[in-house]
């Protein structure tokens, strides 16, 4: 739970802080020297977070019992050298003031709070946040846990760029089986993300990007000796560059995973995290563990299901659905890219409304026309129609898509290394017969 809360509390700040630094460190119209490396900007915020993370990991160690981990964190005292830094950056020597509290019958509750605070870093980036509150309820056996957290706002203000996140929340419900692996579902939400920037020579901040109603969901479901892992991400609206996207969604599932493999990778990763090894060594071990898990997943017959990847613009929605399977992959295939490539079976169903092609083409046409011209509207309309005609003509005439009920549709399939569109091989540069594996093998021999 402490990792979940810590992630909610600082992930947005770290990402925004890094982005703001990158933007503000970038000199206009200057190409960096190929061997020169920019000096790392000092940040007490980053340093304090990294140091606190190390001490938390050292305190928890290899402990896997959830109740004991929560108890350790609630009693954790950071080192005397770190406390003043945490007090300055977070306004609290503990970052989160976590306490054990009365819970429902047979359960234990832990509540955590990040006090509101404002901090100005050395690099002139100011952090300001409202109070974050979190509560976890765990049964005394440590086999069920529910965690909720709310955070009204976080803002990061640089000299030329700012970012604000509002109405953040988290809700996780999990159960642990006897092997120690947690199953269940969780969702994290952000009401809005707004980025503002200033033009050169101006001090006025103007909105450059807005994301509304973001939601990220994750779940693990157990089916006997198999498990499914579900991922979902959605944004209600995106406003960037004057072209609003009304909705964007990603829904993926990894199905028929061997539950034992999930248990093994979870156990190994926890061992690494509590090993006390240097960060580089931990990273290497984690990558090795994940690689072994990937091999196990593929050879055991797991599949990737694309339930929905879609985006909407002006009332029209483009979408991709599909599935990726692996046909009787064995260990020897991993040492042969060609052999492995022929074991992949994938099918993607793509739908693109013609109305969306027309709308996007009109936007592109507008960039080719002088907006001050007396007949600008007519020119934009004509340019848009020309662009749309070229795009639609190429897709249909060359066999990439078929027209059906106002939509461009394409059934893209990969089987035995060959790529087809709507059941036919379409010649592509370097791949005249649609054989992906043959094309890849040819590039490796050059």
Image (tube, rainbow, N blue to C red):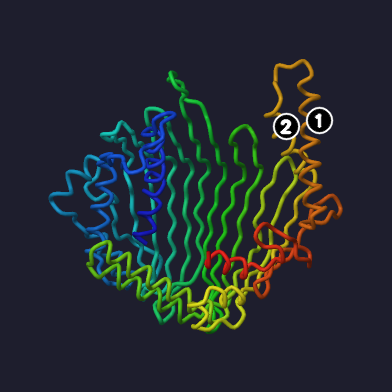
Q: Residue at x 77, y 52 (%)?
A: 395
Closest to the observer, 70 or 231: 231
Query: Element at badge 1?
Result: helix
Q: Residue at x 36, y 62 (%)?
A: 109
Is residue 121 positioned above or below 328 on the image? above
Q: State the residue at coordinates (51%, 77%).
A: 336
Image side of residue 371 versus residue 64, left or right:
right
Quadrant the N terminus occupies: bottom left
Q: Nearer the viewer, residue 245 or 299?
A: 299
Counting from the top left corner in percent of width and height, residue 30 is at: 41, 31
Between 181 and 405, the residue placed more toward the observer is 405
Q: Observer-nearest residue: 140 or 433? A: 433
* Residue under the point 24% across and 45% down: 92
- Residue 390 in percent (x, y) is at 78, 42
N-terminal of the pair, mark 2 or mark 1, is: 2
Please tell me how crowded label 2 is: few (under 14), some (14-19), or many (20+) other residues with Cα within 10 Å: many
The vertical placement of 72 against 208, above or below, is: below
How far across and how far down the image is residue 154, in percent?
Answer: 41, 40
Secondary structure at badge 2 equals helix
Decide: marks 2, 1 in contact (CB < 8 A)? yes
Residue behind mark 1: 382
Relative to 408, 159 lies left or right: left
Q: Give the class, few, some or many, for how many residues have Cα within 10 Å of label 1's Cα (few <14, many ≥20).
A: some
**Can you name the residue that lies furthest to the right here?**
405
C-alpha gap between disc 2 and disc 1: 8 Å
The residue that mark 2 highlights is 365
315 relative position to 288: left or right: right
Where residue 293 sits in the image (x, y, percent)?
A: 45, 75
Which label belongs to residue 48?
Answer: none
């Amino acid at each position: 739970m402490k990792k979940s809360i810590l992630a909610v509390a600082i992930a947005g700040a770290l990402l925004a802080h890094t982005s703001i630094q990158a933007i503000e460190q970038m000199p206009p119209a200057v190409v960096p020297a190929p061997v020169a490396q920019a000096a790392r900007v000092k940040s007490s915020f980053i340093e304090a977070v990294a140091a606190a993370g190390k001490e938390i990991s050292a305190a928890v160690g290899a402990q896997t019992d959830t109740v004991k981990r929560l108890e350790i964190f609630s009693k954790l005292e950071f080192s005397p050298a770190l406390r003043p830094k945490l007090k300055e950056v977070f306004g609290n020597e503990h970052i989160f003031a976590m306490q054990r509290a009365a819970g429902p019958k047979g359960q234990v509750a832990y509540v955590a709070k990040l006090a509101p605070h404002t901090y100005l870093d050395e690099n002139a980036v100011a952090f300001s946040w409202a109070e974050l509150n979190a509560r976890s309820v765990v049964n005394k056996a440590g086999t069920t846990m529910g965690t909720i957290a709310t955070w009204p706002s976080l803002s990061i203000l640089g000299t030329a760029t700012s970012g604000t996140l509002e109405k953040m929340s988290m809700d996780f419900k999990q159960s642990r089986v006897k092997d120690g692996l947690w199953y269940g579902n969780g969702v994290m939400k952000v009401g809005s993300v707004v980025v503002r920037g200033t033009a050169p020579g101006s001090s006025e901040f103007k909105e450059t990007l807005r994301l509304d109603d973001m939601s990220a969901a994750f779940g693990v479901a157990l089916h006997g000796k198999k498990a499914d892992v579900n991922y979902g991400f959605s944004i209600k609206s995106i406003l960037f560059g004057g072209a609003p996207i009304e909705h964007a969604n990603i829904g993926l599932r990894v199905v028929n995973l061997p539950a034992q493999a999930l248990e093994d990778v979870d156990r190994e990763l926890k061992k690494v995290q509590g090993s006390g090894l240097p960060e580089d060594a931990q990273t290497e071990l984690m990558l090795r563990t994940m690689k072994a898990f990937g091999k196990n997943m593929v050879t055991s017959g797991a599949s990737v299901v694309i339930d929905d990847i879609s985006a909407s613009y002006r009332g029209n929605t483009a979408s991709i659905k599909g599935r990726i399977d692996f046909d009787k992959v064995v260990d020897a295939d991993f040492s042969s890219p060609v052999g492995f490539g022929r074991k992949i079976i994938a099918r993607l169903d793509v739908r693109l409304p013609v109305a969306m092609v027309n709308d996007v083409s009109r936007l592109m046409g507008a960039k080719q026309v002088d907006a001050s011209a007396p007949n600008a509207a007519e020119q934009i309309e004509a340019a848009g129609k020309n662009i749309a005609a070229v795009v639609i003509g190429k897709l249909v005439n060359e066999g990439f898509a078929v027209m059906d009920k106002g939509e461009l549709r394409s059934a893209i399939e990969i089987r035995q290394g060959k790529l087809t569109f709507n059941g036919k091989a379409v010649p592509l540069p370097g791949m005249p017969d649609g054989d992906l594996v043959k094309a890849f093998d040819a590039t490796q021999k050059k």
